[in-house]
Image (spheres, grey):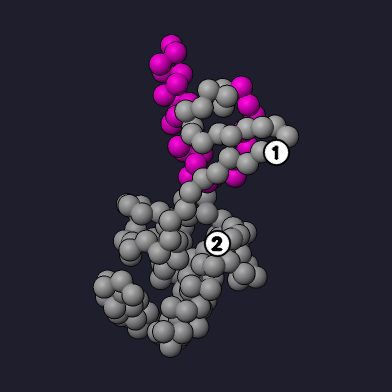
Amino acid sequence: MPRRWPAVATALCIAALAQPGWADELRVCADPNNLPFSDVRQNGFENKLAELVAQQLGRTVAYTWWAQRRGFVRSTLKAQACDVIMGVPVGYDLVETTHPYYRSTYVFVSRQDRGLDISSLNDERLRHLSVRIFYFSSVIYLIGFFFAFLVSRII
């Protein structure tokens, strides 16, 4: 368990106790359609983590559902609609974060008969392939930056 965990749990208890009616709930802001992270049926792993935290605090989870798009933090956490967002990137400066609890990578997936073995965003073949990306994933920003860099070098 991270050393900062007790401080985070205490801060959540104090914030919840300061508001009448919130003492029994851990108010979580989450995306209703963002598996494997979260969904309205609470099948995501961040839903399961929220349940574990709530159990440790002796509370129940109460969700505020909001699509994780531009303005998510402003419309939820900063609007005091919730106490916590379960998963944000390391170094995300809009909120205070705990230590990371997992790391992730990105992969290139293609049909086997294409014979592609792409292992880097620097691969020349990417200039001529159609690439599909999950909307609003952080890789969009990385690829957008990468192609902006390429265009600036060509011009």
Residue 41 lies, with reference to residue 141, above or below; the image says below
Along the line of sight, which residue is nearer the eye, 134 or 67? 134
* Secondary structure under the numbered disc 2 in the rendered image: loop
Q: Is residue 144 magenta?
A: yes
Q: Is residue 141 visible?
A: yes
* Secondary structure under the numbered disc 1 in the rendered image: helix
- Displayed quadrant of residue 113: top right
**Residue 138 shown left or right of residue 12 in the figure:** right
Q: Is residue 21 visible?
A: no
Along the line of sight, which residue is nearer the eye, 91 or 64? 91
- Displayed quadrant of residue 83: bottom left
Furthest-right residue in this view: 113
Residue 9 lies, with reference to residue 72, above or below; the image says below
Tell me how far mark 2 sits from mark 1, CA to CA. 28 Å
Amino acid at the residue labelled 2 = Phe
| Magenta-tinted stretch | 128-155
Furthest-top residue in this view: 155
Q: Quadrant of the N terminus?
A: bottom left
Name the residue located 56 percent from the left edge and 56 percent from the top edge. 67
Residue that label 2 marks: 37
Name the residue located 47 percent from the left edge and 28 percent from the top edge. 122
Name the residue located 43 percent from the left edge and 56 percent from the top edge. 103
Residue 57 lies, in percent from the top left, at 40, 84
Residue that label 1 marks: 112
Residue 145 lies, in percent from the top left, at 43, 31
Picture mark count = 2
Tag 1: Cα neighbours inside 10 Å, few (<14), some, or many (≥20)? few
Q: Is residue 141 magenta?
A: yes
| Nearer the camera: disc 2 or disc 1 | 1
Which comes sooner in the sequence, label 2 or label 1?
Answer: 2
